[in-house]
Amino acid sequence: MNEYLSVSQLNNYINRLLIGDTILQDFWLKGEISGFRLYQQSGHAYFTLKDEASAVSCVMFKSRARHLKFKPEDGMEVLIRGSIAVYARQGKYQIYAEDMQPYGIGGLFLYLEELKNRLKAQGYFDQEKKKPIPALVNRVGVVTSQDGAAFQDILRVLRQRHSGVEIILVHSSVQGADAPLELAAGIRMLNEHSTVDVIIVGRGGGSFEDLMAFNSEEVVKAIYESKLPVISAVGHEVDYSLADLAADLRAATPTQAAQLAVPDMQYLQAGIDDYQQRLLRATSNHINKCSETLDRVMMRRVWREPEIVLGKSEEILANLQSDLLDAVLENWKVKERAFSVSITALDKLSPLKVLSRGYAVVRQGDKIVRQVDQINPGTQLQIDLSDGVVDVTVDNRERVERWKR
C-alpha cells in the first residue's frame, strides 16, 4: 500500500465526498456577481459569486445559460441553484449553476417586466378593447378590503357626489398570497350578477411588495374578461400596476376613482336648472315674437275692413264663374258638332243603307259568301234584302272576271 496520495487521487477523493453530500448537490446560494464572462463560441458562462468575506467560482453551461430571462452583470445580487464539485485539473471546487434569478426587489421587477410583455403580446392592454364608463351611474361595485381606508375614501366621495348611489362591496384581501385569487373572484362575482354599472378595484398605498396582488396575472385576466367597465385605483398617484394597464380607466387614487365613477349630481342639477331657465327664456321670447307678428297681421286691412276686401274678391269670383260657364258651354257646342259629324259618317257606313240601294248579303248558315268558289250547285243559301230574307237553292254557278283596282 502506498504511503502517499497523488494529487489526482486527492482531488478525486474530495470530489467524491462533495458529490456524495445530498445537500451540496441541490442548493440555493445567494451572492454578488463578479467577473461575469459569457463566451460566444461555447455559450458557457463563468463568474465568481461573493459576499463581504468570501468568494466561490461558478460555471453555467450553455444548456442552462440560454434559458436565463435576464442579463447577469457584475455587482448584481442573485440567487443560483446548483451543485458543487471539484475541478480536478486545477484542484479547486466550483459551483455548477442550474438556475439563476435576481434577488429581492430587483427580481420582482424583472419578473413583472416579463409578465407585462407577455400579457401585452396577448392583447390584455389594448386600448381599442377598453370599455367606456357610463355617463350616468346609479350602482357601483367595489372590490377591496372592507377594513381599509381606501374603501372609506371611496364611500365618502361617492355619497358626496351622488347621494342616491347604491354601493355593493365585495370584500377581498388586497395583499398576501390569497389576495390575487380573492380580487379576481370579486370581479367575476359582480359580472355574474350584473347588478352594477361600473366596478372599482383597488387599495390604498403601500410598499412595492404590498401592491404585488395587483400585478398578478389572475387579477389582470379578471379585469380584461370583465363585461362591466372597470376602474383601477391602486395606491397613490406614483404607483402603477399591471391592473392599471388592463383596466378600462386608471385612477391615480381611490378618491379619484370614486370621482370618475359617478357624476356630481349637484353639478348636473345646476346644469339642468340652467338649461330649464334658458328654455323658459327662449320659449317666452318665441311667444313674444309670435304675439308681435299676430298684432301686425291683425292690423292689416283684411281684418279691419273685411267687407271691402271680400267685396272685391266676390266680384272677381263672379267673373271667373261666368268665364268658366261660357267656356264650358262653348266646349259643349264644339263637342256636340263633332259628335253629329261622327254620327252622320257612321250612318253612311251602315249595312242597312247599302241594302236599301239594291244590294244583298248572301249567307250559307252563319258564313257570308264572298266568292263563287265557296258554293256548289244544290247548296242552300239565304239572301238578306233590305226588307227580308230569301232562301234559295243554287242550280248553277259561273265565275265572272270583274275589274279590280
Image (cartoon, helix red, strand yellow):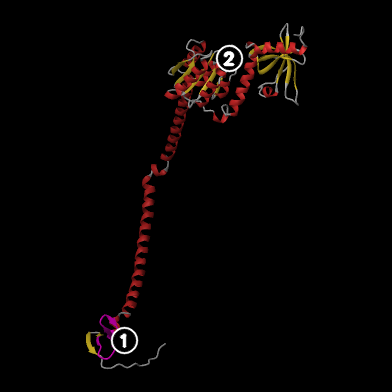
Q: Is residue 161 visible?
A: no
Residue assigned mark 1: 374
Q: Amino acid at mark 1?
A: Gln
Pointer 2 residue: 236
Tell which of 336 and 207 is nearer to you: 207
In the displayed structure, does residue 333 sit left or right of residue 115? left
- In this view of the protein, which residue sits in the foreground, 314 or 256? 256
Q: Is residue 2 left or right of residue 351?
A: right
Q: Quadrant of the N terminus?
A: top right
Q: Nearer the viewer, residue 106 or 145?
A: 106
Q: Amino acid at mark 2?
A: His
Instruction: Of the two numbered discs 1 and 2 on the same chain, state the one appearing first in sequence.
Output: 2
| Res 179 seen here | yes
Q: Position of residue 326 (x, y in %)?
A: 36, 63
Q: Please report the residue visible at 39 percent of the width from the left and 48 percent of the height from the top.
A: 309
What segment is highlighted magenta in the picture?
A: 355-382
